[in-house]
Amino acid sequence: MKIKVARCAGFCFGVKRAINIAEKALDELKGEDKIYSLGPIIHNPQVVDRLLKNGLHVVSDLEKIKGGAVIISSHGAPLDTIEGIKKKGVRLIDAVCPFVKYAQRIVKDLKKDGYEIIIVGDSAHPEVRALKSIAGKNKRSKKLGIISQTTQNKENYINEIKKILGRDFSEVKIFNTICNDTSKRQSAARRLLKNCDLMIVIGGKNSANTKRLWQICKESGVDSFHIETELEMSKNWFNGKKCVGITSGASTPDSMVKKIIERIRRF
Ligand code: SF4
């Protein structure tokens, strides 16, 4: 049985950057001040556990923050959250991915120019909640501005755009805000699907981009499993398979990809 790893696996640029920022801050403020993140800093429980051991405090609401500093995750945070942090007088550490910031700038400009803003993505995801807070209350308009969550599946986005264009409009601006890493990762997975009869998708069960990769794999008809660690695999998944493809979400470390390959080899 062959094992093929997608060309684009392991941490993406934005996640790597956010982890570096968090580790640097934890190192600098060690023992002096607490460092918080509102919710997990990235959507990978194993990596977050490591940061917790190094002193990060993950809290669910602002009330639990008592001085120190707060890291804004790679996904960004809603405006009222940022305001709340500032009011508390604690230090803000910005780890927002530049691709997410680019989408935020577009929403700001569309709002300024009076467009009705349509965001295609998971409404409960922190990135989309942040974008919605910038868009504010949308007024019905014939001028439409359409943008996507950075980790959307391109096909989904195109289908949603087609539906939106069924509306009455005088002007429409469409932005491709799907980040480079997401596009490359999805294309690499599609290439693997052509040659493999089993796909393993590695990444947090709470990671939007990993779930989309898994959705792409499942929709292709190839047997596919979404796992976080090597311990979730079962030997019988590989019975009679000729080629297993491996892909991973943007917040999956290379070390986890390696562990999974090693376990498959042992099987
Ligand atoms: S998936 Fe894209 S947008 Fe999200 S953190 Fe990574 S590089 Fe940034």
Image (spheres, rainbow, N blue to C red):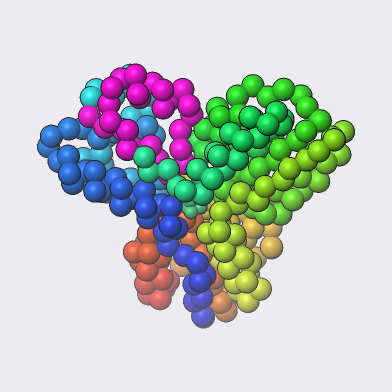
Left or right side of 21 for 83: right
State the residue at coordinates (61%, 65%): 187
Q: Report x, y in % for residue 199.
A: 56, 66
Q: Is residue 79 magenta?
A: yes
Which image quarter holds the C terminus?
A: bottom left
State the residue at coordinates (23%, 24%): 67
Instruction: Say if 205 sits above or below 82 in the image.
Output: below
Determine which quarter of the picture holds residue 134: top right
Q: Report x, y in % for residue 64.
A: 30, 22
Determine which quarter of the picture holds residue 66: top left
Q: Is residue 195 magenta?
A: no
Q: Report x, y in % for residue 48.
A: 33, 45
Region of the chain picked out in magenta, as a range: 68-93
Query: Is 96 in front, or is 211?
Result: 96
Determine which quarter of the picture holds residue 87: top left
Left or right side of 193 for 67: left
State the residue at coordinates (36%, 40%): 94
Residue 211 in view here: no
Instruction: Say if 263 sits above or below 25 in the image.
Output: below
Query: Is 123 in front, or is 213?
Result: 123
Residue 98 in view here: yes
